[in-house]
């Protein structure tokens, strides 16, 4: 290795650019990275939306480029807010046939706020409706002026599908990087930014980071977010075990006992920079002077998606729901939903557990049911946010915490045996075979303590079509056979599980 001689502008001081790819959903962010890496992860994504943060380094024309693939703009904002500069260059992906969309504008606002140079990638040039000039015009209205419109932003018209002009995009990135003269000192103070962290059942806590300055080595004692770690091993983006990682190198680190947050800095233990990574475990409340506060335990598969989901919920509070509601995050973490998560939510009146890409073990589901704690899991952020709005408005909480199951009789069927099957639509909660049930002649929601049910018995069996089932959930029609039989059943009556 050539010795580093202080602050001289030498080739040894220069480091590879770190690039973040952003843009509207389905405009081709992941496809472009696939084309660059000659790999294919799009097929494994749910709904075509990138859900994880990854970092990859490629070699192009004897130069290295490091890419960060974020799960969304919220995670980018979180990283920038806590850890300073996330990336050196933002590649803004815009579909040539669709132009500037809401998330395109989001990406632009993040890039401008971070004061990071933007390279515009006009993707899907192979489509029939491609109109790059219209894209450039729309970008100009958002303060992004490309070179041929008199601005400074480089733009490349390409197709990730056919790989047309992918090389020109890489040329543009290297050009911008050269103008920036990005420097780092391999022998200086360690600064690495966490871009992903999660708890792996087999490997323990796995932290992905990119070294921005200094060198990270196996055996180093480091700290991040107040969590100390002795580096046990490191793996590069090719899955190869390595002993050291210099500037701009993405690497997975093993050795943390706790899961640090995305965006936190990794520094040497005892470093003066350690104060930049102080962990705050106090419950965070989003929304002030609210009439109603709901307590939430939030779990996600990775730290990156956890931050994105949390930011989306915060935005829901501050924008669409307004000042009426507030959200108190009792705990935010990664991994499957556990019994302690359920009990923590149960300790707060009306607390709920929301999971993103996580499992709910059967024992945990049983505990939640016994303690009347709502536990819900989701595969997309959009589903979670939509449901969270209902929860904040009280409807879902009231239905699941107070109602075991409620349905209205819409039809009656006589069996050859003489028994009557009540064709029922489940309105709230769920009906379960073998469960206690009462019959009312009005909506049980309007029933008072003075009202006596017309009948109380047991659900002998539940039928969906020709099949006998054990549970029927909300908004589903089913056949209910009661035990003992109740001869007074009529269409319009209500069933309520006890």
Image: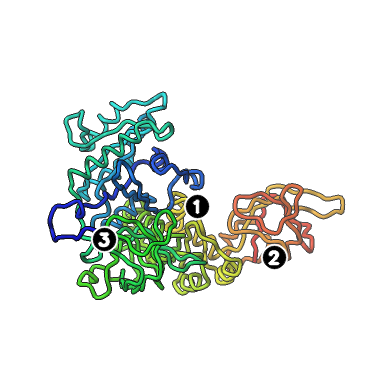
Give whichever of 23, 324 is nearer the camera.
Answer: 23
Give whichever of 335, 417 is nearer the camera.
Answer: 335
* Mark whose residue sits in front, 2 or 3: 3
Report the residue marked by disc 3.
83
Q: Quadrant of the N terminus?
A: bottom left
- Report if the CB atoms under discs 2 and 3 are less than 8 Å apart: no
- Report if the CB atoms under discs 1 and 3 are less than 8 Å apart: no
Q: Residue at x 51, y 67 (%)?
A: 201
Disc 2 from disc 3: Cα separation:
53 Å
* Mark whose residue sits in front, 1 or 3: 3
Report the residue marked by disc 2.
435
Residue 394 x, y percent position in the rendering: 45, 59
- Report if the CB atoms under discs 2 and 1 are less than 8 Å apart: no
Q: Secondary structure at mark 2?
A: loop
Residue 289 x, y percent position in the rendering: 29, 64
Residue 343 x, y percent position in the rendering: 50, 73
Task: Say if 82 sits above or below 47 in the image.
Answer: below
Disc 1 from disc 3: Cα separation:
28 Å
Report the residue marked by disc 1.
379
Q: Secondary structure at mark 1?
A: loop
């Amino acid at each position: 290795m050539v010795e580093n001689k202080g602050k001289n502008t030498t080739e040894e001081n220069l480091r590879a650019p770190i690039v973040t790819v952003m843009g509207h959903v389905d405009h081709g962010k992941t496809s472009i990275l696939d084309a660059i890496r000659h790999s294919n992860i799009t097929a494994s994504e749910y709904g075509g939306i990138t859900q994880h943060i990854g970092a990859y380094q490629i070699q192009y024309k004897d130069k290295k480029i490091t890419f960060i693939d974020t799960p969304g703009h919220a995670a980018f904002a979180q990283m920038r807010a806590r850890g300073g500069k996330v990336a050196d260059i933002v590649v803004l992906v815009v579909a040539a046939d669709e132009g500037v969309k809401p998330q395109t504008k989001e990406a632009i606002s993040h890039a401008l706020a971070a004061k990071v140079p933007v390279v515009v990638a006009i993707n899907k040039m192979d489509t029939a409706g491609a109109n790059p000039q219209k894209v450039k015009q729309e970008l100009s209205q958002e303060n992004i002026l490309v070179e041929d419109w008199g601005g400074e932003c480089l733009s490349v018209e390409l197709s990730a599908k056919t790989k047309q002009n992918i090389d020109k995009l890489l040329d543009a990135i290297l050009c911008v990087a050269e103008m920036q003269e990005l420097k780092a000192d391999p022998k200086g103070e360690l600064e690495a930014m966490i871009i992903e962290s999660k708890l792996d059942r087999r490997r323990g806590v796995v932290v992905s980071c990119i070294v921005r300055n200094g060198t990270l080595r196996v055996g180093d004692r480091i700290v991040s977010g107040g969590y100390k770690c002795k580096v046990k091993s490191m793996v590069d983006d090719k899955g190869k075990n390595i002993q050291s990682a210099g500037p701009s190198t993405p690497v997975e680190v093993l050795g943390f006992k706790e899961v640090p947050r995305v965006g936190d800095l990794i520094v040497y233990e005892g470093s003066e920079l350690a104060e930049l990574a102080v962990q705050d475990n106090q419950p965070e409340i989003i929304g002030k002077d609210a009439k109603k506060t709901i307590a939430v335990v939030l779990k996600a598969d990775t730290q990156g998606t956890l931050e994105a989901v949390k930011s989306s919920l915060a935005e829901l509070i501050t924008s669409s729901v307004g000042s009426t509601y507030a959200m108190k995050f009792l705990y935010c973490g990664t991994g499957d939903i556990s019994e302690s998560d359920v009990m923590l939510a149960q300790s707060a009146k009306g607390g709920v557990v929301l999971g993103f890409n996580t499992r709910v073990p059967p024992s945990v589901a049983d505990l939640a049911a016994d303690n009347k704690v709502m536990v819900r899991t989701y595969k997309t952020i959009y589903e979670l946010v939509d449901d969270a709005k209902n929860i904040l408005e009280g409807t879902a909480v009231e239905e699941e915490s107070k109602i075991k199951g409620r349905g209205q009789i819409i039809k009656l069927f006589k069996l050859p045996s003489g028994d009557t099957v009540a064709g029922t639509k489940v309105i709230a909660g769920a009906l379960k075979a073998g469960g206690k049930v009462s019959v009312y002649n009005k909506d049980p929601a309007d029933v008072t303590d003075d009202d006596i049910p017309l009948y109380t018995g047991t659900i002998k069996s539940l039928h969906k079509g020709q099949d006998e089932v054990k549970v029927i959930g909300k908004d589903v029609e089913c056949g209910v056979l009661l035990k003992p039989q109740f001869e007074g059943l009529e269409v319009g009556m209500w069933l309520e599980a006890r």
